[in-house]
Image (tube, rainbow, N blue to C red):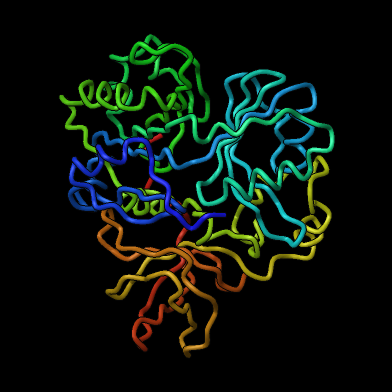
Amino acid sequence: MTDQLKTVPLNDLHQKLGAKMVPFAGFMMPVRYSSDLEEHHCVRNGVGVFDVSHMGEFILKGPKALDLIQRVSANDASVLFDGKIQYSYLPNEQGGAVDDLLVYRIDEEEYFLVVNASNIEKDWNWIQSHNTEGVPMINASDDLCLFAVQGPKAAEALQKLTSIHLAEMEYYTFKKGTFAGLPDIIVSATGYTGAGGFELYIPRYAAIHVWHHIFEAGKEFGIKPIGLGARDTLRLEMGYCLYGNDIDDTSSPLEAGLGWVTKFTKNFINSEALLQQKQAGLQRKLVGFEMIDRGIPRGHYELCDAEGNVLGHVTSGTQSPTLSKGIGLGYVPTAYSKPGSEIFVKVREKLLKAQVVKLPFVKPTV
């Protein structure tokens, strides 16, 4: 492992665009170009582009590829069909998660996995350590760039660049086709914002070409580059987990609300222990909460009861640009997990009132 920060292929362009660059997941990444607030609203109401080329991509091939995916992931990938995508996670043997990921079925013998940037090496080694059947694996992370074009105007803007009928694509499906004159581009109806849009997997050599074409096509819709700051507020308004904050190697995926992608109809790593945990009943749960008192919940702030007894900690928190109030995620005992439950966030020794709410905080537009 090297401590040297990597850069995305368009690093110089982002700097020219005035981006503030910060270290994130082992990469120098644009955190904002203008303001987090402006960029957040640009995506919620129009269209914006995230360069998320730091993400990792693996290709698994051959007749045993599905068997390997079934063994290392909690969701049931056997239900996938060509062009379908699935959200899943990689359980570890200690009851936590190695990572969360997306699984794309290219065809019966080829799968495309998208993993978090900070976990590329860890995930690769983990999957490879369980690859007892010699499934051919390709780490394509350094060969691909990933642009997330998000917002209600994304389909209209991008349609100029492809013959794929974008508006007809269902959520969590993808198509391969010509995009901006390039063949075999994966266009995926996915994203991390809840605002609709697409993710485009581009060969590294064509990154600048595609970026310029996207911005030309989106000019009439006020398209803007968007940084990690707005990416975080957008995903938090949806209640989406961020690996390293809300889920990690030690936290139970069931407590994190990932029971819906945990399929006990098959055997997978640690499935027996997770099933026992489910049957015994969860002791705590990851919940969403909104501030009633004025204040912004931040990661690691204590969550307390009315007497100040610590219940848990904030795992993610921010001021919601859409709701103009503080929102957050955190683990609390099950007794406090029902919507409407009153909890308190400890901010500078003061207990500020909050209320558990049903996720998402903001209704998605997809």
What residue appears at the point 25 percent right and 60 percent down from the top-left corner?
324
- Give the camera-side residue of 188 and 296: 188
Asked if 20 appears above or below 88 in the picture, the reply is below
What residue appears at the point 83 percent right and 43 percent down from the top-left corner?
267
Task: Tell whether 37 sits left or right of 10.
Answer: left
Q: Look at the image and tell me whether residue 364 can be seen.
A: no
Task: Tell whether 199 sits left or right of 280.
Answer: left
Quadrant placement of the N terminus: bottom right
Asked if 127 appears above or below 320 in the picture, the reply is above
Task: Tell whether 172 sits left or right of 37.
Answer: right
What residue appears at the point 44 percent right and 11 percent down from the top-left corner?
183
* Image quadrant assignment for residue 349: bottom left
Q: Where residue 310 appears, x then y in whole percent?
A: 52, 84
Q: Where residue 211 appears, x then y in whole percent?
A: 29, 27
Quadrant placement of the C terminus: top left
Q: Where residue 208 appears, x then y in whole percent?
A: 30, 26
Asked if 72 appears above or below 237 in the picture, the reply is above
Q: Look at the image and tell me whether residue 326 can be seen.
A: yes
What residue appears at the point 84 percent right and 38 percent down from the top-left corner?
132
Q: Where residue 119 appears, x then y in whole percent?
A: 57, 50
User: What count of labels does the image hold?
Assistant: 0
